[in-house]
Structure formats: structure tokens, C-alpha cells
Image: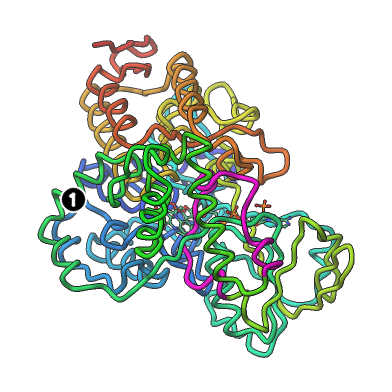
């Protein structure tokens, strides 16, 4: 039951609202968490910085923003009625359609009445004596709850690079991760885009259609596969809808939680002709499934280079100017070791007369002046500068909140050498604090909605078990955490993921420790760990029972 009480004392402490669960974030994770929490008969509040639901799809409104997981798969599976009634109009849904879907979910399950929008959580402090969390917001309000769930997203802290002079630019600056709600009209303008990751690769073709001239500032080229987006084929949609349960279950048996054409075992076990034919077939089919053509592509450099060379060949075929094609062809990392991109006419865009590629590797940015971007040799005068410069991924949103656990331990301090968690779900020293798709979970290596649903369901089941036990708290043990982080590291070391300087490693953020954050062992292995831990009475967690307070009961199988 929700309660409001006044803690008395100084007036600045003010009223504090009490709930069973506080959820931070109203993206797909927070929305589903709220739905399941209500199902347990618990009171919950969701605190959300944005003025609406949808998370990623609320913020990333840049032209061209689109999902790279097919829309029949990038959606919730928890409600048969929902998945039957919703109609996706394209093979890959646009940002606006996904945002409409998120709003539809919020309406259907009447979620908004428990979401407080326009409210940023600034701190979350564990009260040792009461075993509860007190959460404060930028609106000067405080909330308390026994349980707190961080559904703050892996890619929600947009990163603005520290380029000298950026604040002196006299034109307009937009970050793709925080794009304005109003229409941005770039017609007749000289526009610059810094960044050629997934966001840059999506936004560039759209901006090129509007701008008088577009300058693309590229430091590292990326592999990208044509998405071959198309209107939804009604037969295809019906096939999915008729077999949704079976297909969703099958998707969960794959490493990424995505049903692709199955991979063949090894790129090196077939003849070059056969390999070429298969790459051509996958290239023509489009989409990120290209990276799953052979299962050894992400494990074996020789196998990987066959796919990388194929894509470089395609870039050279598409891009008319061989010098530009060379600059666009990635050579410094294995294909798939950074998140592979899916595009619509990206490489073709460099054949337009109003588009210039600026190679920052040979000609780095020196400064940003009021007029535009200044490199070693040139000044690029701009009206608008678009930063497609990515995110402080996986830990960024959490580290922006003052999270304080037992005995004043801050999460920032605990994670200063890299994040450590047990299963990505909890971190020792921070009892009753759950993280959805936290570092150490498969999260960003998957269809993230699958990862979210699995994590949220686990957390809800755990809450039900803890309430059944009259538990005062549940907390990951340091031993379980250390053991899990070793497994996370070992899983990555067996792959080529560590060969790229990517945001998976955190190296895009100055000063962030280089630690590979996601678990790459795949959804099935991860989920069976999670299920086993719960089945063994939450092995690896300490559970304190209210009856035993302050004694601790360590549940074991
Ligand atoms: P988010 O959607 O990020 O939601 C987190 C919410 O928490 C946000 O609304 C944020 O405002 C809020 N929040 C954070 N901090 C605070 C705070 N201190 N106080 C209050 N509120 C806070 N994944 C895929 O699987 N396939 C894709 O094709 C795909 N495309 C993507 C495209 C883009 C442009 C980006 C950025 C990501 C993409 N992703 C994709 C990943 C995507 O983030 C997830 O699929 C999913 O939307 C994450 O949902 P979430 O609820 O976990 O986090
Ligand atoms: O960010 P990124 P993103 N000077 O970090 C460059 C998801 N997503 O927003 O590589 C010059 O990948 C940086 O250069 P470099 C998806 O998971 C999905 O594009 O550091 N350049 C890089 O080119 C994705 O992986 C979709 O050399 C600078 C770029 O900015 C994740 O979100 C769409 C710079 C950043 O690329 C992040 O993607 C969009 C500087 N100072 C996002 N600083 C889909 O299609 C940075 N860069 C599903």
C-alpha cells in the first residue's frame, strides 16, 4: 500500500512517499517491471527523466533511427494478446513506430498512473538499519522502498566528446541520442556529422537528402550490411503470429535471442566459391544476420577475415571513388567485434555530390571554432553539427546517480576499476538493488527485449520468493560475483570481441576502465545459470530473514 509520511525534523527533508518497489526508468525494462510488480500485489512507482515512456525510442528521434532486429521479434512476448493485436508496418520498425508501440503498451496495461515523468533520480541511498532504499529526485522529492530496480538502460547516457572549442560553435548542435522533438529542418544548410557508428550510419543518408552539403567526419570506419527494409509482408506477419509461442521459444535457444538463418559451422570448412555464394545470399537478404553466417566468424581471425574482406569488396563495388571507398573500408577490427551496423543506402550516400567524407585518421579535428570544424588542414564551415558520438554504455546511467550501499559504499567507488556484478542482476554491498540488463549480463549482445524480459521475470520471481520467505534483504556475495566476473571475462577472451576498441570495453569514455562488460556466452547459457541459482535457493546470494534480524541465513540447496 502506498503511504505518505513526514519524517519530521528539518523542513527540507519534506514528505517521503513509500512504496514496496521503486523502479528507475520507463523504457521497455521499467514498463515490464512495473507490470509484473503489480501482478505480485506490490505497490510500485516508476521514476523517469523523460516526459514519456519508451526510453531509447523516446530519446533517439534522429532521422533514420530504426531497429536492426526484425520487428516481429523486437517486441514483448509476455502477452499473447499484445503480440497478436499489434501490427508492425515494416520489416524493421522505425523509431516512431516503436515509440507508438511503447505508448500502446503503457495504455493497454494502464502503466502511466504509476509513472512519474520529468523526474530524474539523483541519488539512491540504502538505509542499513531499516533495510530500505531512499531515492531522491531533481524535483526535490524523496521516495522510499524496500526494493529498488534500476531499469536505466545500457545506452541511455549520451556521450558528448570533449573536443576543444565545442562550446564556442555558433551554429546548432544536436546529439543523436537526445534529438529534438520538433522537426529539424536542415534544408539549405551546411551540416557536419561526427561519428560513424550505428547512429551515424543511420542518420547520414537521411541528412544528405536534406542538407545543402553534408560533411561526414569519420575516425573509425565500420562494417555495415544493407538492412533491406521493406513494408511488412502480410504472409510473413501471419506466419509469425500463428507460431509466435514456438518461434519466441526457439529464439531463446539462440545465443542472441534472435531467429536468423542458422549459421553453418565454419567459414574455413567450405570452398571459397561456396563461401562467396553464401555471403552473397546473406548480403542480398540483408540485415545483421550476415555476421552469423558461420559460427566461427567471431572466434577465428582467419574465418572472420573472409567475411570482412567480402564486405570491404562490396564497399569498393558501391562507392564510386576508390579513395573514398578505401577510407570507408574497415581494417582495424574484425567484423562483428564492434556492433555490426545495418544501413539503408549508407555507402551509396558517398556517391552524392553534396557529401564529403573527412578522414579524421589522417586529418584529426584540432578544434571546433564558432564557424565549424577545424582539422589540421581545413576549416569546415557549418550551420549545424550533429554528434553521433555514442554513449557511456552499460554503466553510464548508473554512475550518474549517487548510489550508496551498505556502510556508505558508493557504486562509483566500487566500480572504479570496472563493474562487477553477479549475473548482471545485483552487486555485493547493495542489498535489494536489482539491475535490469546490467554489466555482466548478455544485454547488448542480444535482441535486448529478450534480455529485458528474462531479467525482469527473474527479478519478479525473486521478489515473490523473498516476500514468501519474509526476507529482509537479498544481496550478492562477493565470492559469487568474483566467480561470475571471471566467467564473463573468459567468455569474451574466447572470442574476437576484445580485438576492437569498442564501447563494450568502455574505451570510448575518457578515464573509464577498459573492462569488457557484456556476457557473450549467449542467452541459453546465461538463462540456465540464472534459473539454476534461483532453483538452488538463490545460491550465491545472502538472504537475511526478518525473523532472524539481524542474523543472516545463507540459503543453500
Ligand atoms: P532504455 O530504453 O534506455 O530506458 C531507460 C530509461 O531510464 C530512459 O527512459 C531514461 O530516461 C531513464 N533513466 C535513466 N537514468 C535515469 C535517472 N537517473 N532518473 C530517471 N530516469 C532515468 N536493441 C536491440 O535489441 N535492437 C535494436 O535494433 C536496437 N536499436 C537501438 C538503437 C538505438 C539508437 C539505441 C540507442 C539503442 C538500440 N538498442 C537496440 C538498444 C536499446 O537500448 C534496447 O533495445 C532497449 O530499448 C532498452 O530498454 P531499457 O528499458 O533497458 O532502457
Ligand atoms: O555510438 P558508437 P552509436 N572525434 O559508440 C565517434 C546501438 N544503436 O550511437 O569509433 C571523432 O557506436 C566514434 O569514433 P571511434 C548499437 O548497439 C543501434 O553509433 O571512437 N569521432 C564512432 O564512430 C550501437 O552500437 C542502432 O573512432 C568520435 C562514433 O562516434 C550503440 O547503440 C542505431 C569522437 C560513436 O559510435 C551505439 O551506437 C543506433 C571524437 N571525439 C545505435 N567521439 C541500430 O541500428 C566519438 N566519435 C539498431
Residue at x 43%, y 47% (from the top left corner): 272
Q: Where is residue 410 in the image (x, y as percent from the top left)?
A: 60, 30
Local packing at callout 1 (Cα closer than 10 Å; few below 14, some 14-19, many 20+) is some
Say above or below: 108 vs 122: below
Task: Between residue 150 and residue 416, name the one nearer to us.
Answer: 416
Q: Where is residue 23 in the image (x, y as percent from the top left)?
A: 40, 46
Apparent side of residue 164 relative to residue 221 in the rendered image (left or right): right
The residue sitting at the left extreme is 242
Q: Is residue 18 visible?
A: no
Please name the residue that numbered disc 1 is placed on. 247
Say above or below: 231 vs 537: below
Asked whether 335 falls inside the magenta stretch, the response is: yes
Asked whether 340 falls inside the magenta stretch, the response is: yes
Q: Where is residue 230 in the image (x, y as percent from the top left)?
A: 33, 74
Residue at x 59%, y 72% (from the top left corner): 204
Task: Between residue 526 and residue 49, name the one nearer to us.
Answer: 526
In the figure, residue 426 lies in which quadrant? top left
Residue at x 37%, y 37% (from the top left corner): 269
Apparent side of residue 421 relative to residue 505 in the rendered image (left or right): left
| Quadrant the C terminus occupies | top left
Q: Where is residue 293 in the image (x, y as percent from the top left)?
A: 37, 48
| Quadrant the N terminus occupies | top left
Give the magenta range: 322-348
Amino acid at each position: 500500500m502506498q503511504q505518505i509520511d513526514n519524517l519530521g525534523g528539518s523542513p527540507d527533508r519534506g514528505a517521503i512517499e513509500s512504496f514496496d518497489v521503486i523502479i528507475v526508468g520507463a523504457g521497455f525494462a521499467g514498463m515490464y517491471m512495473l507490470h509484473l510488480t503489480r501482478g505480485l500485489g506490490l505497490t510500485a512507482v516508476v521514476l523517469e527523466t523523460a516526459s514519456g515512456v519508451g526510453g531509447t525510442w523516446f530519446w533517439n528521434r534522429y532521422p533514420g533511427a530504426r531497429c536492426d532486429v526484425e520487428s516481429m521479434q523486437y517486441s514483448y512476448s509476455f502477452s499473447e494478446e499484445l503480440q497478436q493485436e499489434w501490427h508492425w508496418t515494416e520489416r524493421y520498425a522505425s523509431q516512431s513506430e516503436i515509440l507508438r508501440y511503447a505508448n500502446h503498451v503503457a495504455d493497454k496495461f494502464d502503466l502511466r498512473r504509476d509513472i512519474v515523468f520529468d523526474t530524474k533520480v539523483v541519488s539512491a541511498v540504502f538505509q542499513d538499519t531499516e533495510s530500505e532504499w531512499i531515492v531522491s529526485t531533481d524535483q526535490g522529492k524523496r521516495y522510499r522502498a524496500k526494493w529498488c530496480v534500476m531499469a536505466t538502460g545500457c545506452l541511455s547516457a549520451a556521450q558528448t566528446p570533449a573536443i576543444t572549442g565545442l562550446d564556442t560553435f555558433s551554429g546548432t548542435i544536436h546529439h543523436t541520442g537526445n534529438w529534438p522533438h520538433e522537426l529539424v529542418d536542415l534544408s539549405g544548410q551546411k551540416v557536419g556529422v561526427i561519428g560513424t557508428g550505428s547512429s551515424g550510419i543511420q542518420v547520414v543518408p537521411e541528412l544528405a537528402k536534406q542538407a545543402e552539403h553534408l560533411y561526414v567526419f569519420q575516425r573509425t570506419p565500420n562494417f555495415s550490411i544493407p538492412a533491406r527494409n521493406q513494408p511488412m509482408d502480410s504472409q510473413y506477419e501471419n506466419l509469425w503470429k500463428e507460431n509466435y509461442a514456438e518461434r519466441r521459444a526457439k529464439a531463446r535457444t539462440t545465443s542472441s535471442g534472435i531467429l536468423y538463418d542458422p549459421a553453418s559451422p565454419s567459414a574455413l570448412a567450405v570452398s571459397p566459391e561456396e563461401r562467396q555464394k553464401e555471403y552473397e545470399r546473406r548480403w542480398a537478404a540483408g540485415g545483421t544476420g550476415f555476421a552469423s553466417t558461420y559460427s566461427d566468424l567471431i572466434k577465428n581471425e582467419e574465418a572472420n577475415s573472409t567475411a570482412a574482406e567480402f564486405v570491404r569488396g562490396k564497399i569498393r563495388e558501391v562507392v564510386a571513388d576508390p579513395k573514398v571507398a578505401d577510407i570507408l573500408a574497415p581494417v582495424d577490427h574484425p567484423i562483428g567485434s564492434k556492433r555490426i551496423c545495418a544501413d539503408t543506402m549508407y555507402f551509396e550516400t558517398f556517391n552524392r555530390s553534396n557529401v564529403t567524407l573527412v578522414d579524421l585518421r589522417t586529418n584529426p579535428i584540432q578544434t571546433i571554432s564558432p564557424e565549424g570544424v577545424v582539422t589540421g588542414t581545413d576549416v569546415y564551415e557549418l550551420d549545424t553539427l550533429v554528434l553521433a558520438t555514442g554513449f557511456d554504455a552499460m554503466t553510464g546511467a548508473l554512475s550518474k546517480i549517487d548510489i550508496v550501499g551498505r556502510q556508505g559504499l558508493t557504486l562509483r567507488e566500487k566500480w572504479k576499476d570496472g563493474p562487477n556484478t553477479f549475473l548482471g542482476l545485483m552487486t555485493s554491498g547493495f542489498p535489494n538493488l536489482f539491475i535490469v540488463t546490467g554489466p555482466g549480463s548478455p544485454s547488448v549482445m542480444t535482441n535486448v527485449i529478450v534480455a529485458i524480459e528474462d531479467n525482469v521475470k527473474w527479478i519478479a520471481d525473486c521478489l515473490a520468493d523473498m516476500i514468501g520467505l519474509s526476507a529482509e534483504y537479498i544481496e550478492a556475495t562477493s565470492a559469487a560475483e568474483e566467480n561470475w566476473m571471471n566467467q564473463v571475462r573468459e567468455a569474451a577472451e574466447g572470442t574476437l570481441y576484445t580485438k576492437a576498441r569498442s564501447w563494450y570495453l568502455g574505451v570510448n569514455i575518457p578515464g573509464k576502465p577498459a573492462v569488457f562488460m557484456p556476457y557473450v556466452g549467449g542467452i541459453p547459457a546465461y538463462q540456465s545459470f540464472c534459473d539454476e541459482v534461483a532453483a538452488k535457493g538463490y545460491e550465491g546470494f545472502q538472504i537475511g530473514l526478518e525473523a532472524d534480524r539481524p542474523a543472516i541465513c545463507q540459503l543453500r540447496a
